[in-house]
Amino acid sequence: MLIKPASDIAPSNITDKTLYLNRRQFMQGAGALALAASGLHSEAAAAPRLAARRSPLSVAGAANTRDEITGYNNFYEFGTDKADPAANAGRLVTRPWAVQIDGEVLKPRTFDIDELLKLAPLEERIYRLRCVEGWSMVIPWIGYSLSEVLKRVEPTGKAKYVEFTTLRRPEQMIGQRGAVLDWPYVEGLRIDEAMHPLTLVTLGLYGELLPNQNGAPVRIAVPWKYGFKSAKSIVRIRLVEKPPVSSWMRANPSEYGFYSNVNPQVDHPRWSQASERRIGEFFKRKTLMFNGYADQVASMYTGMDLRKYF
Ligand SMILES: Nc1nc2c(c(=O)[nH]1)N[C@H]1C(S)=C(S)[C@@H](COP(=O)(O)O)O[C@H]1N2
Ligand SMILES: [Mo]
């Protein structure tokens, strides 16, 4: 039995659960397909489905399972253990929700989450995510390019950078009661990075609205950078003239730079970045330059010393 790589899957099949069979299910072959069709995944199927067309910007190959993606998370607002977000994020109230967009724009405005869900056609983008800690996943996100949002607020000529801010609500985000990071969580991109078609406003995964532990109701996904650049549960996008200071740069400027492009040749001061472990796999894989997206993004960094601008 053969399961086609993602790039060969017909658009009519996009929401079909069988697309997401992981390696283990793949080994089980037809048995797994029958299981998927039999309604045993009914817990997931009960959630509202998001209709999304498959994007050519997706990577081929098997995605991680929904359990892996929703059970092994970094979301320090809910604790620092990988299981904490799944255990604690259920308390976060994600409606009503709005994202304020301001700064160097001609038309500052606030988008309600329901507006964001309808702002542009939803696409399924299967992206690699590489955490700076040395693990990775393949995740079927749902959303659309951040450029769709940014063009509607009309950035001025002074908008050189974009700053993302996560919600600060310690009543519901129990990790914010401690000072692990300087809350709220802040991240940033250069304007060309933010406008790059790969940079995703993420509203769902696996055909459903985002689970809280993955950054509900809206987060960013920047697949060629270490995972921490992809801020979760954002409430503000500010266009600015100067490079934003991210939470991680503030916490440890010698370890976390502004760019944080995935780069197997530039080690973290305390560990190598040459390889990674894909969650669900035993053997390590070689980490790819720009996390495998070099063809699409390398030109944004020509002439830059990537050791200096790490
Ligand atoms: N607000 C916020 N965003 C965050 C984080 C966080 O702690 N808080 N962790 C980052 C890190 S380190 C990673 S690897 C990814 C993990 O995303 P995932 O849990 O959806 O896989 O989220 C990033 N976004
Ligand atoms: Mo991470």
Image (cartoon, rainbow, N blue to C red):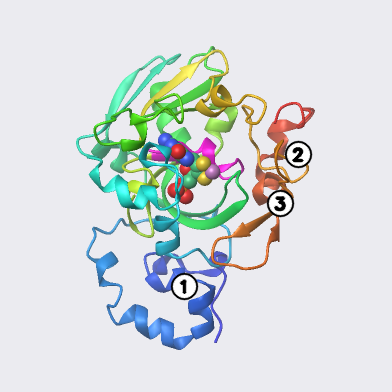
Which structural element holds mark 1?
A: loop
Query: At 29% from the left edge and 65% from the top edge, which residue is drawn?
Result: 44
Query: At 71% from the left edge and 27% from the top edge, which residue is drawn?
Result: 309
Q: Which residues are magenta?
A: 219-232
Query: At 58% from the left edge and 66% from the top edge, which residue is drawn?
Result: 61
Residue 153 vertical placement versus 137 (above, below): above
Q: What residue type is disc 1 on?
A: Leu
Q: What residue type is disc 2 on?
A: Val
Give the residue pinned by disc 3.
Answer: 288
Q: Is mark 2 within 8 Å of ligand 2?
A: no
Give the farthest residue toward the front.
Answer: 178
Q: Residues within 10 Å of mark 1 (few under 14, many from 20)?
A: many
Q: Nearer the viewer, mark 3 or mark 2?
A: 2
Which structural element holds mark 3?
A: loop
Q: Quadrant of residue 283?
A: bottom right
Give the residue pinned by disc 2.
Answer: 266
| Label pair 3/2, CB-CB below 8 angstroms | no
Q: Quadrant of residue 35?
A: bottom left
Q: Position of residue 96 (x, y in %)?
A: 19, 35
Who comes first in sequence, dot 3 or dot 2?
2
Question: Residue 21 shows which numbered tag?
Answer: 1
Q: Residues within 10 Å of mark 3 (few under 14, many from 20)?
A: some
Q: Is mark 1 within 8 Å of ligand 1?
A: no
Q: Is residue 131 magenta?
A: no
Q: Is residue 198 visible?
A: no
Who comes first in sequence, dot 1 or dot 2?
1
Q: What residue type is disc 3 on?
A: Leu
